[in-house]
Amino acid sequence: MKVTVWNENQHEKSLPKVTELYPGGIHEYIAGFLKADDVEVRTATLDDPECGLTDEVLADTDVLVWWGHMAHDKVPDEVVERVFKYVMSGMGFVALHSAHHSKIFRKLMGTTGNLKWRDGARERIWCIKPNHPIAEGVPETFALEEEEMYGEPFDIADPQEVIFIGWFNGGEVFRSGCTWVKGHGRVFYFQPGHETNPSFRNENVQKIIKNGVKWACPVRKNIVLDCPHVAPLENIEE
Ligand code: ZN
């Protein structure tokens, strides 16, 4: 499996806390725990030419993981269109935390991606589909002592499956782990991962992201269905 981890890599330049938590940046940290014997991982960032998401890279990517927050609008539309085309033809897409407002996630959803938010919350995550592949090895519930509150209503396309629900100490709840199939591509959204909170260091969060990447990996990629006029396969003359 070939995974590309994309991070805008902007907070890393101005907030020392981010690189204290995640040396090398969020993308390098995530790439670090995703790497395995059978998982090849590369990273790409906003500052790379074409955001590091050229045809060459995307054609060689089974699953694209996305983290962005302050620079969503800096991602050129042509890059968004290109990523969209690859998801439609089978590439998996895993959107993390504030990727809810990325151009590509909004395009995939066809909605605003809006939600309620507040810094400095405590979250309890509940797994409500224990037999789902993304829930493998994940306990029924676990807590994140510091995470940003994301609250419903979350303006997304109706998920195919909701696997995790988050509860926050302000009383809010959130569909924290959701899946969709968009075109031929599998899409997973997972909510924890605020840049100044240690969530990506949590073993259950890491397990869920690993499982999500595995789940989103296509059986077949580069599927293009055209719209041909065809002759019948059977004799329909009589
Ligand atoms: Zn955040």
Image (cartoon, rainbow, N blue to C red):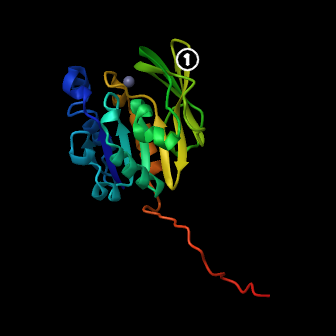
Outermost residue to the right: 238
Quarter-of-image position of residue 206: top left
Location of the C terminus by quadrant is: bottom right
Residue at 21% x, 47% y is 49
User: Dot 1: few (<14), some (14–19), or many (≥20) neighbours within 10 Å?
Assistant: some
Q: How far across and down, in percent of the image, does residue 234 sit?
A: 70, 84
Ligand 1 in which quarter: top left
- The amino acid type, in three-letter code, at marker 1 is Glu
Q: Is residue 130 visible?
A: no
Image position of 128 (left or right of 203): right
Q: Give 157 or 22, whichever is nearer the viewer.
A: 157
Image position of 180 (left or right of 32): right
Q: How far across and down, in percent of the image, does residue 199 sit?
A: 37, 26
On the image, numbered disc 1 is attached to which residue? 172
Location of the N terminus by quadrant is: bottom left
Image position of 121 (left or right of 166): left
Q: Is residue 159 visible?
A: yes
Q: How far across and down, in percent of the image, does residue 31 sit?
A: 29, 42
Residue at 24% x, 33% y is 25
Q: Secondary structure at mark 1?
A: loop
